[in-house]
Image: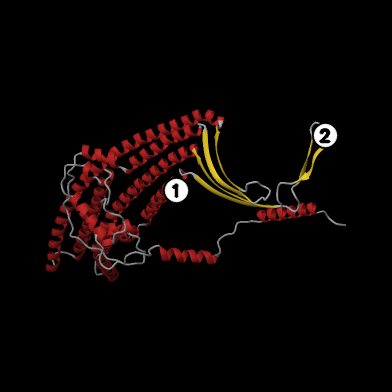
Amino acid sequence: MTIPLFPRLHRTALAASLAFLGGCASVTPVPLADAELQTAVKSSVDRVASKQEPITASISLYEAMARALKYNLDYRVELMSQALRLSEFELTRYDMLPQLVANAGYNSRNKEAGSSSRSLISGRESLEPSTSTEKSIFNSDLTLSWDILDFGLSYVRAQQKADEALGAMEQRRKIANRIVEDVRTAYWRAVSAERLLGKMQELETTVQVALEESRQLERRGTTSPLAALTFQRELIQIRAELQRLQRDLVVSKRQLGALMNVPPDQEFSLVLPARQSTAQSLDMEPGDMLTSALYYRPELREVRYRARINRRELDAALLKAMPNLRLFAGLNYDSNAYLYKQDWVGVGTRASWNLISAFRYPLAKKAVENQQALLDQRELALTMAVMTEVYVSRTRFNHLGAELQTAGERLDVQSRILEKIRAGSQAGSVSKQTLIREEMNTLAEEVRHDIVFADLQNARANTYAAMGMDTFGPDVTGAESVSALASSLEQLWTRRDQPRSDATGSAR
């Protein structure tokens, strides 16, 4: 028995559909294989610090800042985010252009597409079966169309994408300011560590030797047990204080290396500037600082861009509620030999209006207004926070300046005491216990002084960040070498240390 062609085709199509659906249903989650994970781990380790200028000499403060701005991964994420927003903005420009669409198709059938006609009056067949279409047809067209409503919406979206790109730039400024603050703190703590960790290790060795000698004297009974134990207690307290000071300093260099994107196992040295005990003053009035902050702070600018994006959303909602007009013109071709003309030019226009969108517009407008009210309140909250931060940062900077002066005086007095104690120890009039204690006190004062100085440097950077001042000049592109960028940063920060009267004009 012969099976008709159409049932065979139906069965084939049904079987293919069932096979396709079965294949879709058989998809299951596949975790990463061990080999893939190992490859990814090795690739990440190899790429994390690749394409960086090698460290060939001791790193200064401005080189540390330059390396952080060039190689810090968090900052590079923000750079890539800004580049992505700019790319999205460039893409939206093409949405405003007319559409030029090329279509091509091929149709074929096994039998002629013939038909006949039946009279609606008499019911008789009025024409024998005939056809006006070939069994195989190729057709194509090239159509240029322009949608007025789509153009308006694309224009609004392009403006919003432009504001998003500007907002991403402000976010990048914010991250750069934070990184520079962290670098200044970590750098001065790391400098203190390089100055003092060697001295601490020497003193800890001296303490351990003295402690062992005291224990031997106690075991031999050549000294009073109570005096020996009291001496040991004081030595152990000194060692505990040394360990606490080391804990505060030992990780500072690794923290600085992380900010500069230096691998943890790579060693580097730092330029060790002379210790300073005098703080530079801020030659700016609080009112000027506040004006600069409200004008330049990236958080405030970012929320203002978001408010502008939201206001343009109201324009988009209005455009969606309006009638649409579409214009088109195109070249057409059809290979059907029965056609009188196989190629032709077509032009036309079409108007449409989604009436439901007109009822949706009031709700969309209300949502935009509520979002605008939220952004207005957020701007006010940020304004108050910025004003508070400006005054707090200024107060903190001035207070740390006073603390630094006090720490310098304490260190000077303690250093002079240590000189007297060492002279007495050489003359035999001062015990070893007293010498060790005063050496410990001197180291502690040096650490306290350096920590206050590091906090003061952080406070200085925080004060500029509170005013919205960029950490780098407008001439910096990011493509400079580390040395060129470090030189630019040094000039900028040296210029900021000089007195000036105009706050807002110098903020950028």
Amino acid type for the residue under numbered disc 2: Gly
Is 398 located above or below residue 233 in the figure? above
Residue 414 badge: none
The kind of secondary structure element at disc 2 is: loop
| Residue 195 quadrant | bottom left
Question: On screen, 410 above or below 423?
Answer: above
Q: Secondary structure at mark 1?
A: helix
Q: Is residue 403 above or below residue 250?
A: above
- Can you tell which of label 1 and label 2 is closer to the viewer? 2
Q: Which of the two labelled residues, at mark 1 and mark 2, occupies the earlier sequence position?
A: 1
Image spot of residue 448 (x, y percent): 23, 54
Residue shown at 12% from the left, 65% from the top: 423
Rendered location of residue 303, percent (x, y): 37, 39
201 vs 150, nearest the viewer: 150
Label 2 sits on residue: 123
337 vs 263, nearest the viewer: 337
Left or right: 137 as drawn, with respect to 373: right
Q: Which residue is mark 1?
A: 91
